[in-house]
Image (cartoon, rainbow, N blue to C red):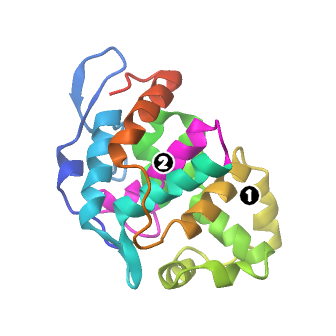
Amino acid sequence: MGCAAGGPRARARHRTRNGGDSGETAGENGDVRDLDVGAIVEVLASGAGHGLGPGVPVSQLDHALQTAALLAHHHRGDGELAVAGLVHDIGHLLPGGTDEAHASEAAGAVRWALGERVATTVGLHVEAKRYLVATEDAYGGVLTTDSAVSLARQGGAMTGEEAAAFLARPWAADAVALRRADDSGKVGGLVVGNLASWVPLLQEVSRRAGASGG
């Protein structure tokens, strides 16, 4: 899965909590954090030009929209979980991102705007894959080729001790729900709502999180 080396993400700006406009904030490892809703939408839109992976017939944007739609359908009324599905792979579209770190990079990018639950759920979605591989015999057959290949780079199946520690994490169940939608949201030609239709919910979640809303 490729990462965009620049583009909208490199130009993104955010608003500070006191309402001022500020440049994007770099974390200790050079990752850029604190995107507002407008910047998040801009980065997601750039995913229309990036394939999800070898042999997967959807773009990064298609995948984000399908994942969010599946979560909205199966977990009605849970806007935060659907939004987590929308942004879970945004790390693939950040400059300099890696497949191994894309979940944590995505969490860092959206935490300020979308809150701790969304960020933590996003940050755990790769761990959820490792958990499901370890605990469900049939789960490996669900993975697409790109996900199966990346599994080894991401640490492989969890040990029993790791699985127990994962389940004890806040919002681990949300991460598992996100992971299942992630695995299913890769259908070529599937028609779901467009990105603009998600902006009001992104803004609502952002307001609840105490951010400016973009």
Q: Considering only order in the chain, which callout, 2 or 1, is on the residue closer to the N terminus?
A: 2
Along the line of sight, which residue is nearer the eye, 170 or 76?
A: 76
Along the line of sight, which residue is nearer the eye, 139 or 120?
A: 139
Residue 107: assigned label: 2
Residue 92 in magenta stretch? yes
Label 2 environment density (alpha carbons within 10 Å; few <14, some 14–19, many ≥20): many
Residue 205 in magenta stretch? no
Report the residue marked by disc 1.
Answer: 166
Q: Which residue is outermost to the top?
A: 18
Along the line of sight, which residue is nearer the eye, 156 or 80?
A: 80
- Across the whole image, how many numbered discs are drawn on residues? 2
Amino acid residing under circle 1: Phe
Amino acid residing under circle 2: Ala
As measured in the structure, the alpha-carbon distance from the residue carrying label 1 to the one carrying label 2 is 17 Å
Q: Residue at x 30, y 56 (%)?
A: 94
Q: Is residue 141 left or right of residue 65?
A: right
Q: Residue at x 48, y 48 (%)?
A: 107
